[in-house]
Amino acid sequence: MSGSDDRAVVIGGGLAGVTAALELADAGLKVTLLEGRPRLGGLAFSFKRGELTVDNGQHVYLRCCTAYRWFLDRVEGAHLAPVQDRLDVPVLDVAHPAGPRLGRLRRSALPVPLHLAGSLARYPHLSLAERASVGRAALALRRLDPADPALDGVDFATWLGRQGQSPRTIEALWDLVGIATLNATAGHASLGLAATVFKTGLLSENGAADIGWATVPLGDLHDTLARKQLDSAGVRTELRTRVTGVSRTPEGNWRVDTEGESLDAAAVVLAVPQREAHALLPPGALADPDKLLDIGTAPILNVHVVYDRKVLKRPFFAALGSPVQWVFDRTDSSGLPDGGQYLALSQSAAQDDIDEPVSVLRAKYLPELERLLPAARGAKVRDFFVTRERTATFAPTPGVGRLRPGARTDTPGLYLAGAWTATGWPATMEGAVRSGLSAAHAALTALGRHRKHPLQEAA
Protein backbone atom coordinates (compact mmCIF):
# COMPACT_ATOMS: atom_id res chain seq x y z
CA MET A 1 0.00 0.00 0.00
CA SER A 2 1.10 3.54 -0.66
CA GLY A 3 -0.26 7.09 -0.70
CA SER A 4 -3.69 7.34 0.87
CA ASP A 5 -4.37 3.60 0.57
CA ASP A 6 -3.02 2.92 4.05
CA ARG A 7 -4.47 6.02 5.68
CA ALA A 8 -7.62 6.42 7.74
CA VAL A 9 -9.28 9.49 9.21
CA VAL A 10 -11.52 9.28 12.28
CA ILE A 11 -13.79 12.27 12.86
CA GLY A 12 -14.75 12.62 16.52
CA GLY A 13 -12.73 12.00 19.66
CA GLY A 14 -15.31 10.48 21.98
CA LEU A 15 -15.09 6.88 23.12
CA ALA A 16 -16.28 5.62 19.73
CA GLY A 17 -13.72 7.63 17.80
CA VAL A 18 -10.81 6.88 20.12
CA THR A 19 -11.67 3.18 19.97
CA ALA A 20 -11.82 3.18 16.17
CA ALA A 21 -8.55 5.08 15.89
CA LEU A 22 -6.71 2.71 18.23
CA GLU A 23 -8.00 -0.40 16.50
CA LEU A 24 -7.16 0.92 13.02
CA ALA A 25 -3.69 1.97 14.12
CA ASP A 26 -3.07 -1.37 15.82
CA ALA A 27 -3.78 -3.00 12.44
CA GLY A 28 -1.05 -0.96 10.82
CA LEU A 29 -2.92 1.96 9.27
CA LYS A 30 -1.75 5.54 9.46
CA VAL A 31 -4.55 7.21 11.38
CA THR A 32 -5.50 10.84 11.94
CA LEU A 33 -8.07 11.60 14.63
CA LEU A 34 -9.90 14.93 14.39
CA GLU A 35 -11.81 16.40 17.33
CA GLY A 36 -13.45 19.81 17.51
CA ARG A 37 -13.20 20.12 21.29
CA PRO A 38 -9.96 20.89 23.16
CA ARG A 39 -10.04 17.40 24.71
CA LEU A 40 -10.93 13.78 24.07
CA GLY A 41 -13.69 11.83 25.78
CA GLY A 42 -16.89 13.13 24.18
CA LEU A 43 -19.65 13.41 26.78
CA ALA A 44 -17.71 11.55 29.48
CA PHE A 45 -15.17 14.18 30.50
CA SER A 46 -13.80 16.26 33.37
CA PHE A 47 -13.17 19.94 33.97
CA LYS A 48 -11.70 22.17 36.69
CA ARG A 49 -13.80 24.22 39.07
CA GLY A 50 -11.48 26.01 41.42
CA GLU A 51 -9.55 23.30 43.26
CA LEU A 52 -12.02 20.59 42.23
CA THR A 53 -11.72 18.27 39.26
CA VAL A 54 -15.33 17.64 38.25
CA ASP A 55 -16.81 14.98 35.99
CA ASN A 56 -19.58 16.40 33.83
CA GLY A 57 -21.69 13.46 34.96
CA GLN A 58 -21.47 10.25 36.94
CA HIS A 59 -20.74 7.34 34.61
CA VAL A 60 -20.77 3.70 35.68
CA TYR A 61 -20.48 0.41 33.85
CA LEU A 62 -21.21 -3.24 34.61
CA ARG A 63 -19.03 -6.31 34.61
CA CYS A 64 -20.92 -7.50 31.51
CA CYS A 65 -19.69 -4.42 29.59
CA THR A 66 -16.94 -6.35 27.84
CA ALA A 67 -16.22 -3.67 25.25
CA TYR A 68 -15.72 -0.85 27.76
CA ARG A 69 -13.61 -3.15 29.92
CA TRP A 70 -11.50 -3.85 26.83
CA PHE A 71 -11.17 -0.09 26.35
CA LEU A 72 -9.99 0.37 29.94
CA ASP A 73 -7.40 -2.37 29.44
CA ARG A 74 -6.30 -0.86 26.11
CA VAL A 75 -5.62 2.55 27.68
CA GLU A 76 -4.06 0.86 30.74
CA GLY A 77 -6.66 2.28 33.10
CA ALA A 78 -8.61 -0.74 34.36
CA HIS A 79 -7.12 -0.42 37.86
CA LEU A 80 -8.52 3.13 38.04
CA ALA A 81 -12.12 2.01 37.46
CA PRO A 82 -12.57 -1.17 39.53
CA VAL A 83 -15.73 -3.28 39.67
CA GLN A 84 -17.52 -4.25 42.88
CA ASP A 85 -16.62 -7.67 44.20
CA ARG A 86 -20.35 -8.38 44.29
CA LEU A 87 -23.39 -6.35 43.22
CA ASP A 88 -24.67 -4.30 46.16
CA VAL A 89 -26.99 -1.33 45.65
CA PRO A 90 -28.41 0.47 48.71
CA VAL A 91 -31.94 1.73 47.96
CA LEU A 92 -33.44 4.27 50.37
CA ASP A 93 -37.19 4.95 50.32
CA VAL A 94 -38.05 8.16 52.18
CA ALA A 95 -41.77 8.00 51.35
CA HIS A 96 -42.50 4.74 53.13
CA PRO A 97 -45.52 5.08 55.47
CA ALA A 98 -43.46 3.79 58.40
CA GLY A 99 -40.65 6.26 57.76
CA PRO A 100 -37.42 6.06 55.71
CA ARG A 101 -36.50 2.49 54.92
CA LEU A 102 -33.26 1.12 53.50
CA GLY A 103 -33.22 -1.92 51.26
CA ARG A 104 -30.49 -3.52 49.19
CA LEU A 105 -30.27 -5.18 45.82
CA ARG A 106 -27.48 -7.72 46.22
CA ARG A 107 -26.44 -10.88 44.48
CA SER A 108 -25.27 -14.10 46.03
CA ALA A 109 -22.84 -16.70 44.71
CA LEU A 110 -25.70 -18.88 43.46
CA PRO A 111 -26.16 -19.43 39.73
CA VAL A 112 -28.53 -17.33 37.59
CA PRO A 113 -31.38 -16.62 38.29
CA LEU A 114 -31.09 -17.71 41.91
CA HIS A 115 -28.29 -15.20 42.51
CA LEU A 116 -30.88 -12.43 43.04
CA ALA A 117 -33.64 -14.51 44.64
CA GLY A 118 -32.56 -13.95 48.24
CA SER A 119 -32.20 -10.20 47.78
CA LEU A 120 -35.59 -9.87 46.12
CA ALA A 121 -37.22 -11.99 48.83
CA ARG A 122 -36.01 -9.47 51.42
CA TYR A 123 -36.50 -6.32 49.33
CA PRO A 124 -38.60 -4.13 51.63
CA HIS A 125 -39.85 -1.73 48.97
CA LEU A 126 -42.22 -4.30 47.44
CA SER A 127 -44.99 -6.41 48.88
CA LEU A 128 -44.68 -10.19 49.04
CA ALA A 129 -46.98 -10.55 46.03
CA GLU A 130 -45.01 -7.96 44.06
CA ARG A 131 -41.73 -9.74 44.80
CA ALA A 132 -43.20 -13.01 43.54
CA SER A 133 -44.39 -11.28 40.37
CA VAL A 134 -40.84 -10.05 39.68
CA GLY A 135 -39.60 -13.63 39.49
CA ARG A 136 -42.25 -14.52 36.94
CA ALA A 137 -41.44 -11.46 34.83
CA ALA A 138 -37.73 -12.26 34.97
CA LEU A 139 -38.37 -15.75 33.64
CA ALA A 140 -40.45 -14.29 30.80
CA LEU A 141 -37.67 -11.78 30.09
CA ARG A 142 -35.14 -14.59 29.74
CA ARG A 143 -37.20 -16.00 26.88
CA LEU A 144 -37.07 -12.77 24.86
CA ASP A 145 -34.62 -12.23 22.03
CA PRO A 146 -33.50 -8.56 22.20
CA ALA A 147 -32.61 -8.72 18.48
CA ASP A 148 -36.21 -9.56 17.52
CA PRO A 149 -37.40 -6.51 15.52
CA ALA A 150 -40.93 -6.94 16.91
CA LEU A 151 -39.66 -5.97 20.39
CA ASP A 152 -38.44 -2.61 19.12
CA GLY A 153 -41.99 -1.38 18.54
CA VAL A 154 -43.30 -2.20 22.03
CA ASP A 155 -42.71 -0.03 25.08
CA PHE A 156 -41.26 -1.72 28.14
CA ALA A 157 -44.04 -0.58 30.50
CA THR A 158 -46.73 -2.21 28.37
CA TRP A 159 -44.84 -5.50 28.40
CA LEU A 160 -44.26 -5.26 32.16
CA GLY A 161 -47.95 -4.68 32.69
CA ARG A 162 -48.74 -7.81 30.71
CA GLN A 163 -46.39 -9.68 33.04
CA GLY A 164 -48.36 -8.56 36.10
CA GLN A 165 -45.98 -5.83 37.22
CA SER A 166 -47.71 -3.19 39.35
CA PRO A 167 -46.90 0.53 39.01
CA ARG A 168 -45.05 0.28 42.34
CA THR A 169 -42.97 -2.65 41.09
CA ILE A 170 -42.04 -0.71 37.97
CA GLU A 171 -41.07 2.34 40.05
CA ALA A 172 -39.17 0.55 42.81
CA LEU A 173 -37.31 -1.99 40.68
CA TRP A 174 -37.55 -1.87 36.90
CA ASP A 175 -37.32 1.92 36.56
CA LEU A 176 -34.78 2.13 39.36
CA VAL A 177 -32.36 0.32 37.05
CA GLY A 178 -33.90 1.22 33.69
CA ILE A 179 -33.90 5.00 34.00
CA ALA A 180 -30.20 5.01 34.85
CA THR A 181 -29.22 2.67 32.00
CA LEU A 182 -31.73 3.61 29.30
CA ASN A 183 -32.21 7.30 30.16
CA ALA A 184 -35.96 6.81 29.93
CA THR A 185 -38.82 5.53 32.01
CA ALA A 186 -40.30 2.16 31.08
CA GLY A 187 -43.18 3.82 29.24
CA HIS A 188 -40.77 5.61 26.90
CA ALA A 189 -38.27 2.79 26.34
CA SER A 190 -38.15 0.19 23.61
CA LEU A 191 -38.71 -3.33 24.90
CA GLY A 192 -35.81 -4.50 22.73
CA LEU A 193 -33.33 -2.15 24.42
CA ALA A 194 -34.75 -2.85 27.88
CA ALA A 195 -34.41 -6.58 27.22
CA THR A 196 -30.75 -6.06 26.32
CA VAL A 197 -30.11 -4.22 29.58
CA PHE A 198 -31.92 -6.58 31.93
CA LYS A 199 -31.22 -9.86 30.18
CA THR A 200 -27.51 -9.14 29.77
CA GLY A 201 -27.00 -7.38 33.08
CA LEU A 202 -29.15 -9.41 35.42
CA LEU A 203 -29.88 -12.72 33.75
CA SER A 204 -26.79 -13.74 31.78
CA GLU A 205 -24.08 -14.50 34.35
CA ASN A 206 -23.83 -14.42 38.11
CA GLY A 207 -21.64 -11.33 38.30
CA ALA A 208 -22.79 -9.55 35.14
CA ALA A 209 -24.41 -6.63 37.01
CA ASP A 210 -21.53 -5.88 39.39
CA ILE A 211 -20.99 -2.12 39.13
CA GLY A 212 -17.74 -0.38 38.21
CA TRP A 213 -16.88 3.31 38.25
CA ALA A 214 -13.83 5.52 37.99
CA THR A 215 -11.97 6.38 41.18
CA VAL A 216 -10.19 9.15 39.28
CA PRO A 217 -11.61 11.93 37.10
CA LEU A 218 -13.01 10.61 33.83
CA GLY A 219 -10.61 12.87 31.97
CA ASP A 220 -7.70 10.84 33.33
CA LEU A 221 -9.09 7.78 31.53
CA HIS A 222 -10.81 9.11 28.43
CA ASP A 223 -8.46 11.99 27.65
CA THR A 224 -5.04 11.70 29.32
CA LEU A 225 -4.54 7.93 29.14
CA ALA A 226 -6.36 7.67 25.81
CA ARG A 227 -4.12 10.35 24.30
CA LYS A 228 -1.03 8.57 25.60
CA GLN A 229 -2.07 5.32 23.90
CA LEU A 230 -3.03 7.09 20.69
CA ASP A 231 0.41 8.69 20.60
CA SER A 232 2.08 5.33 21.27
CA ALA A 233 0.06 3.74 18.45
CA GLY A 234 1.22 6.42 16.04
CA VAL A 235 -2.14 8.19 15.72
CA ARG A 236 -1.95 11.84 14.79
CA THR A 237 -4.50 13.56 17.04
CA GLU A 238 -5.71 17.05 16.17
CA LEU A 239 -7.88 18.84 18.74
CA ARG A 240 -9.84 22.06 18.18
CA THR A 241 -10.21 20.98 14.57
CA ARG A 242 -13.58 21.38 12.85
CA VAL A 243 -14.34 19.20 9.85
CA THR A 244 -16.11 21.12 7.07
CA GLY A 245 -16.64 18.40 4.47
CA VAL A 246 -16.24 14.75 3.49
CA SER A 247 -16.12 13.84 -0.21
CA ARG A 248 -14.83 11.28 -2.71
CA THR A 249 -11.64 11.97 -4.64
CA PRO A 250 -11.38 11.35 -8.41
CA GLU A 251 -9.24 8.30 -7.55
CA GLY A 252 -12.06 6.79 -5.49
CA ASN A 253 -10.58 7.47 -2.05
CA TRP A 254 -11.83 10.00 0.50
CA ARG A 255 -11.02 13.60 1.26
CA VAL A 256 -11.70 15.20 4.63
CA ASP A 257 -11.61 18.98 4.68
CA THR A 258 -10.99 20.97 7.83
CA GLU A 259 -10.65 24.71 8.29
CA GLY A 260 -6.89 24.31 7.98
CA GLU A 261 -6.11 21.40 5.63
CA SER A 262 -7.41 18.56 3.48
CA LEU A 263 -6.64 14.92 4.26
CA ASP A 264 -6.87 11.99 1.83
CA ALA A 265 -7.62 8.51 3.13
CA ALA A 266 -8.82 5.07 2.09
CA ALA A 267 -11.24 4.92 5.02
CA VAL A 268 -13.15 7.52 7.01
CA VAL A 269 -15.00 6.87 10.26
CA LEU A 270 -17.66 9.40 11.22
CA ALA A 271 -17.79 9.11 15.01
CA VAL A 272 -19.89 12.15 15.82
CA PRO A 273 -23.50 12.61 17.04
CA GLN A 274 -26.23 11.76 14.58
CA ARG A 275 -27.05 15.31 13.53
CA GLU A 276 -23.40 16.11 12.89
CA ALA A 277 -23.05 12.88 10.94
CA HIS A 278 -26.10 13.81 8.85
CA ALA A 279 -24.54 17.18 8.01
CA LEU A 280 -21.27 15.57 6.87
CA LEU A 281 -22.65 12.58 4.96
CA PRO A 282 -22.00 12.84 1.22
CA PRO A 283 -24.86 12.10 -1.21
CA GLY A 284 -25.62 8.40 -1.57
CA ALA A 285 -23.98 7.36 1.69
CA LEU A 286 -27.32 6.21 3.17
CA ALA A 287 -30.55 5.34 1.39
CA ASP A 288 -32.53 7.58 3.75
CA PRO A 289 -30.12 9.85 5.64
CA ASP A 290 -32.96 11.85 7.16
CA LYS A 291 -33.69 8.90 9.43
CA LEU A 292 -30.74 10.14 11.49
CA LEU A 293 -32.67 13.33 12.22
CA ASP A 294 -35.57 11.26 13.53
CA ILE A 295 -33.40 9.73 16.27
CA GLY A 296 -34.41 11.79 19.29
CA THR A 297 -32.24 12.82 22.20
CA ALA A 298 -32.69 12.66 25.97
CA PRO A 299 -31.12 14.87 28.67
CA ILE A 300 -29.19 14.08 31.84
CA LEU A 301 -28.77 16.57 34.66
CA ASN A 302 -26.07 16.31 37.30
CA VAL A 303 -26.36 18.20 40.57
CA HIS A 304 -23.11 18.80 42.45
CA VAL A 305 -23.07 19.64 46.16
CA VAL A 306 -20.01 20.26 48.32
CA TYR A 307 -20.59 20.07 52.09
CA ASP A 308 -18.27 21.18 54.87
CA ARG A 309 -18.39 17.73 56.48
CA LYS A 310 -19.06 14.09 55.69
CA VAL A 311 -22.79 13.41 55.32
CA LEU A 312 -22.76 10.09 53.42
CA LYS A 313 -20.92 6.98 54.57
CA ARG A 314 -21.56 4.82 51.48
CA PRO A 315 -19.93 5.28 48.07
CA PHE A 316 -23.38 5.62 46.47
CA PHE A 317 -27.08 4.88 46.89
CA ALA A 318 -30.33 5.04 44.92
CA ALA A 319 -33.45 6.81 46.18
CA LEU A 320 -37.18 6.15 46.03
CA GLY A 321 -39.98 8.52 47.01
CA SER A 322 -37.82 11.48 46.05
CA PRO A 323 -36.89 13.37 42.88
CA VAL A 324 -33.31 12.36 43.69
CA GLN A 325 -32.30 9.27 41.69
CA TRP A 326 -28.68 8.25 42.40
CA VAL A 327 -26.15 9.89 44.72
CA PHE A 328 -22.38 9.27 44.48
CA ASP A 329 -19.52 10.31 46.75
CA ARG A 330 -16.93 11.98 44.47
CA THR A 331 -14.80 13.48 47.25
CA ASP A 332 -11.58 11.57 46.62
CA SER A 333 -11.65 11.64 42.83
CA SER A 334 -12.31 15.39 42.77
CA GLY A 335 -9.32 16.27 44.94
CA LEU A 336 -11.43 18.11 47.50
CA PRO A 337 -8.67 19.46 49.73
CA ASP A 338 -9.95 20.04 53.24
CA GLY A 339 -12.19 17.46 54.85
CA GLY A 340 -15.58 18.22 53.37
CA GLN A 341 -17.60 15.92 51.13
CA TYR A 342 -18.57 16.29 47.49
CA LEU A 343 -21.73 14.51 46.33
CA ALA A 344 -22.90 14.16 42.72
CA LEU A 345 -26.56 13.49 41.97
CA SER A 346 -27.12 11.76 38.65
CA GLN A 347 -30.57 12.61 37.25
CA SER A 348 -31.46 10.74 34.07
CA ALA A 349 -34.53 11.35 31.89
CA ALA A 350 -34.34 14.90 33.25
CA GLN A 351 -36.68 16.62 30.80
CA ASP A 352 -38.52 18.43 33.61
CA ASP A 353 -35.38 19.87 35.21
CA ILE A 354 -32.84 20.31 32.44
CA ASP A 355 -33.59 24.00 31.79
CA GLU A 356 -34.47 25.07 35.32
CA PRO A 357 -32.33 27.86 36.84
CA VAL A 358 -29.72 26.84 39.38
CA SER A 359 -31.66 28.65 42.11
CA VAL A 360 -34.75 26.51 41.43
CA LEU A 361 -32.71 23.31 41.42
CA ARG A 362 -31.00 24.30 44.66
CA ALA A 363 -34.35 24.90 46.33
CA LYS A 364 -35.56 21.52 45.08
CA TYR A 365 -32.60 19.23 45.72
CA LEU A 366 -30.96 20.48 48.91
CA PRO A 367 -34.08 19.79 51.04
CA GLU A 368 -34.34 16.37 49.39
CA LEU A 369 -30.78 15.54 50.36
CA GLU A 370 -31.62 16.52 53.94
CA ARG A 371 -34.60 14.14 53.84
CA LEU A 372 -32.38 11.34 52.56
CA LEU A 373 -29.30 12.11 54.65
CA PRO A 374 -30.01 13.34 58.18
CA ALA A 375 -26.35 14.32 58.61
CA ALA A 376 -26.79 16.92 55.87
CA ARG A 377 -29.31 18.87 57.95
CA GLY A 378 -26.66 20.58 60.01
CA ALA A 379 -24.00 20.78 57.32
CA LYS A 380 -22.96 23.92 55.49
CA VAL A 381 -23.15 23.90 51.69
CA ARG A 382 -19.85 25.24 50.40
CA ASP A 383 -20.75 24.95 46.73
CA PHE A 384 -23.75 24.02 44.62
CA PHE A 385 -23.66 23.81 40.83
CA VAL A 386 -25.13 21.80 38.00
CA THR A 387 -23.92 20.32 34.72
CA ARG A 388 -26.41 19.82 31.92
CA GLU A 389 -26.20 17.52 28.94
CA ARG A 390 -29.32 18.34 26.95
CA THR A 391 -28.51 15.75 24.29
CA ALA A 392 -26.73 13.28 26.56
CA THR A 393 -28.03 10.16 24.80
CA PHE A 394 -30.25 9.13 21.96
CA ALA A 395 -33.83 8.61 23.13
CA PRO A 396 -34.48 4.83 23.38
CA THR A 397 -38.11 5.18 22.32
CA PRO A 398 -40.09 2.35 20.72
CA GLY A 399 -39.24 2.22 17.02
CA VAL A 400 -35.78 3.74 17.35
CA GLY A 401 -34.17 0.49 16.24
CA ARG A 402 -35.31 0.94 12.63
CA LEU A 403 -33.66 4.37 12.58
CA ARG A 404 -30.20 3.34 13.81
CA PRO A 405 -27.76 2.62 10.94
CA GLY A 406 -25.03 0.02 11.01
CA ALA A 407 -21.32 0.75 10.76
CA ARG A 408 -21.20 0.35 6.97
CA THR A 409 -22.67 3.00 4.72
CA ASP A 410 -23.73 2.50 1.11
CA THR A 411 -20.49 4.11 -0.03
CA PRO A 412 -17.35 1.94 0.32
CA GLY A 413 -14.75 3.36 2.65
CA LEU A 414 -17.12 5.45 4.78
CA TYR A 415 -18.20 4.12 8.17
CA LEU A 416 -20.33 5.30 11.09
CA ALA A 417 -19.63 5.03 14.81
CA GLY A 418 -21.32 6.33 17.91
CA ALA A 419 -23.56 4.95 20.63
CA TRP A 420 -26.55 5.95 18.45
CA THR A 421 -25.64 3.47 15.71
CA ALA A 422 -27.01 -0.08 15.60
CA THR A 423 -25.03 -1.63 18.43
CA GLY A 424 -28.01 -3.40 20.04
CA TRP A 425 -27.23 -1.44 23.23
CA PRO A 426 -28.68 1.78 24.61
CA ALA A 427 -26.55 4.91 24.69
CA THR A 428 -23.84 3.84 27.11
CA MET A 429 -20.05 3.85 27.20
CA GLU A 430 -20.33 0.18 26.28
CA GLY A 431 -22.36 0.98 23.19
CA ALA A 432 -19.93 3.71 22.14
CA VAL A 433 -16.90 1.42 22.32
CA ARG A 434 -18.76 -1.38 20.54
CA SER A 435 -19.60 1.01 17.71
CA GLY A 436 -15.98 2.08 17.34
CA LEU A 437 -14.85 -1.52 17.14
CA SER A 438 -17.54 -2.35 14.57
CA ALA A 439 -16.60 0.59 12.36
CA ALA A 440 -12.88 -0.19 12.56
CA HIS A 441 -13.34 -3.85 11.72
CA ALA A 442 -15.69 -3.07 8.84
CA ALA A 443 -12.98 -0.80 7.43
CA LEU A 444 -10.21 -3.34 8.02
CA THR A 445 -12.19 -6.09 6.30
CA ALA A 446 -12.78 -3.88 3.26
CA LEU A 447 -9.07 -3.05 3.13
CA GLY A 448 -8.01 -6.66 3.47
CA ARG A 449 -6.45 -6.01 6.88
CA HIS A 450 -7.97 -8.93 8.73
CA ARG A 451 -7.62 -8.68 12.50
CA LYS A 452 -9.26 -10.65 15.27
CA HIS A 453 -12.03 -8.73 16.98
CA PRO A 454 -11.10 -8.06 20.63
CA LEU A 455 -14.58 -9.03 21.87
CA GLN A 456 -14.14 -12.42 20.26
CA GLU A 457 -10.97 -12.75 22.30
CA ALA A 458 -12.86 -11.69 25.43
CA ALA A 459 -15.51 -14.28 24.73
Image (cartoon, rainbow, N blue to C red):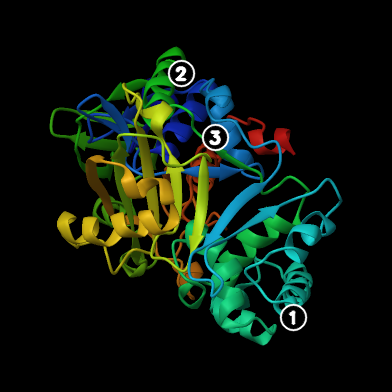
Looking at marks 2 and 1 on the same chain, the residue that comes earlier in the sequence is marked by 1
| Of labels 2 and 1, the one closer to you | 1
* Numbered label tally: 3
Q: Residues within 10 Å of mark 1 (few under 14, many from 20)?
A: few
Query: For numbered disc 3, what is the local secondary structure?
Result: helix
The residue labelled by disc 3 is 444
- Residue 206 relative to residue 324: left or right: right
The residue labelled by disc 1 is 129
Q: Amino acid at mark 2?
A: Gln
Looking at marks 1 and 3 on the same chain, the residue that comes earlier in the sequence is marked by 1
Query: For numbered disc 2, what is the local secondary structure?
Result: helix
The residue labelled by disc 2 is 229
Residue 117 visible (yes or no): yes
Examine the rendered structure and indicate whether residue 309 appears above or below residue 362.
above
| Of labels 3 and 2, the one closer to you | 2
Residue 286: percent from the left, percent from the top? 39, 60
Residue 110: percent from the left, percent from the top? 86, 50
- Residue 110 relative to residue 381: left or right: right
| Of labels 1 and 3, the one closer to you | 1
Q: Could you say which is closer to the camera, residue 25 or residue 449?
A: 25
Q: Residue at x 47, y 21 (%)?
A: 1
Q: Residues within 10 Å of mark 2 (few under 14, many from 20)?
A: some
Q: Amino acid at mark 1?
A: Ala
Q: Amino acid at mark 3?
A: Leu
Residue 93: percent from the left, percent from the top? 53, 64
Query: For numbered disc 1, what is the local secondary structure?
Result: helix
Examine the rendered structure and indicate whether residue 394 appears above or below residue 212.
below
